Image (spheres, rainbow, N blue to C red):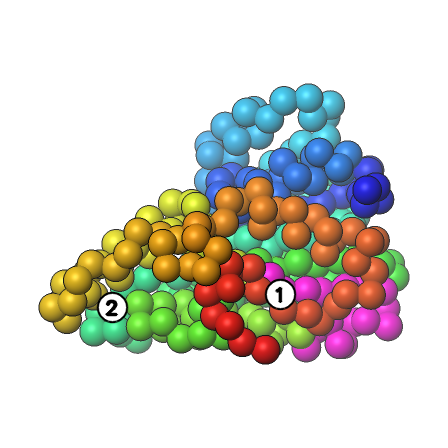
Amino acid sequence: MDLGLAGRHVLVTGASRGIGFACVQAFLAEGAKVTMLSRDDTALREAALSLEKTEGRIAWHAADLRDPASALAALDAIEAASGPLDVLVNCAGAARRRPPGELDAAAWSDAMQAKFFSYIHVMTPAVQRMAARGAGSVVNIVGAGGKVANPTHLAGGAANAALLLASAGMAAAYARQGVRINALNPGQVATERLRQRQEAEARLAMLEGRPAPAVPGATLPIGRPAEPREIADMVVFLASDRASYVTGATIAMDGAATPMI
């Protein structure tokens, strides 16, 4: 199936590893030109150089997206170098998981900065520019914690919930101007973040005198965690013209972990 992404300019935040890097690979496979963005220039460079047969379709830029001025300067530089954005995929930032007894005011604030504002600081100006041009697509990779509370992910889940609302609200606000905005909620994905989640839940279980949690994926109806490329495949579809009537949606990819309507 031709997704119509050849030649489109795609910006992927959090692009140096995990789901973000899988998205970079998926868009390149569709013929898009991709700019990778994260805080770590060295990691970005290594990730970009690991890609083969990109034919000059890959670029990277380092910036701290928690800072609005840095995010805006990055967007300016990226569009000046590679042209206006057609697609934005937000995958940067993740709140640290911790048992509820370890939460304090700083932890709540850090979670909002790490996940909510690192998306908003890029999405707001990018969507405004897309709207002025009359076209664009945004996919926010958020997380199931925004809909289902988890004791080790309360601060991060609150940030996710805020991001889901912002995504739906901006989708409604900009739909008539040709901009589509969707959110994707992965559950367990075989990345370093899943290992960190397992460690946080094991600490909480120990504190509460419970057995250690099951191996990731063991309790899922589907029987395993997702692979990053499986999340990326859905992202590419949502970003493409094949999903031209899909906007304001929140799509779960949790292996049926939470049966809900």
> Which residue is label 1 attached to?
251
| Any part of residue 70 in sight | no
Q: Is residue 233 magenta?
A: no
Q: Which residues are magenta?
A: 169-184
- The residue at 75%/68% (across/down) is 247
Q: Where in the figure is residue 136, as x and y percent of width and height?
A: 79, 57
User: Does 253 sit left or right of 110 as displayed?
Assistant: right
User: Does 88 sit left or right of 177 as displayed?
Assistant: left
Label 1 neighbour load within 10 Å: few <14, some 14-19, many 20+: some
Where 59 falls versus 185 (above or below)? above
Q: Where in the figure is residue 124, as x and y percent of width and height?
A: 67, 65
Which quarter of the image is occupied by the C terminus? bottom right
- Say which mark, if any, is on residue 99: 2
Which quarter of the image is occupied by the N terminus? top right
Label 2 neighbour load within 10 Å: few <14, some 14-19, many 20+: some
CA–CA distance in space, label 2 to label 1? 27 Å
